[in-house]
Image (cartoon, rainbow, N blue to C red):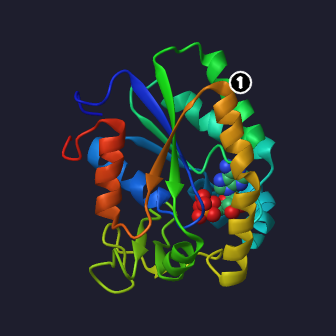
Amino acid sequence: MADNTIAPRNIFSFFGPPGSGKGTLAQQCAKTWGAAVLSTGDLCRKHIAESTEFGKSLEGYLKTGQLIPDNLITDIVTDWLSNKLIVKKDIILDGYPRTGRQVESFFGFLKQQHDFSIKFRVIVFDISAEEVVRRLSSRLVCSNKECQTIYSLTSKPPVVEQECDLCQSSLEQRADDHPHVIRQRLEVFASHKSDVLDSYRRMGHEVHALRVDGKTPEDVFNDFAALIGMRASDK
Ligand code: ADP
């Protein structure tokens, strides 16, 4: 990351309902500031696409909009983080922790690192259920599992119809972006929300709300930059 990155080092957790724009903002931060991003959903979809043993065990959960078991997700996140913490970069966790238990095991892991330069901040994406449904029905994702760039037919269409601007692979609708699965994912999110936020409050962690309703990806990025004290133009 560039020299003007906020010191010492941040780990941001993006926490919000499906379709709230966590992935879009994370991709923008990676592009602009070089933040290292782990999207647990993307990682799961990659394993499924590659038919790894792990991927096979996940398929049923993703298809039905259920969360995968806490111990499985925590193992892959801490594995990824162990390598990333060595590099001095800001880190964005897109979609983790998302249960009270995940919050606890995540902090157990961080404590073991004995790295006091890490500043952990939670960004809660604030959006209405109506906007979520509207957004998810116009969302397309790059089918290349190494890329998974997110598009929106309304707010961020690809330059060429049905084609990824970055790798030219075809775009597809996510398998879990169908109305009955969306409803299930929203319910799952709502059922864990207060648990997660209570855990943070108990532990005294900073929780910032980011209002995203009715905002373009660019506005959300600018608001996020202001919230965390970074200039949107920093490179
Ligand atoms: P969204 O937040 O839009 O539902 P994601 O791409 O973040 O989508 O996640 C898709 C799916 O991946 C989830 O429905 C769940 O099955 C699985 N998943 C992702 N992150 C986690 C997590 N932290 N804990 C458990 N399951 C997860």
Location of residue 4 with respect to 28 vertically, above or below: above
Asked whether, in this view, residue 190 is left or right of residue 11, the answer is right
Quadrant of the snapshot with the C terminus: top left
Label 1 CB less than 8 angstroms from ligand 1: no
Q: Residue at x 64, y 35 (%)?
A: 79
The image quadrant of residue 3 is top left
Residue 230 image offset from top left, x and y in percent? 28, 38
Q: Observer-nearest residue: 84 or 140?
A: 140
- The amino acid on which the numbered mark 1 sits, given as a three-letter code, is Gly
Residue 150 image offset from top left, x and y in percent? 43, 68
Q: Residue at x 61, y 26 (%)?
A: 204
State ligand 1's quadrant: bottom right
Task: Please name the residue that numbered disc 1 is placed on.
Answer: 108
Residue 73 visible in the displayed image = no
Residue 47 visible in the displayed image = yes
The image quadrant of residue 82 is top right
Location of residue 152 with respect to 116 vertically, above or below: below
Q: Observer-nearest residue: 165 or 106?
A: 106
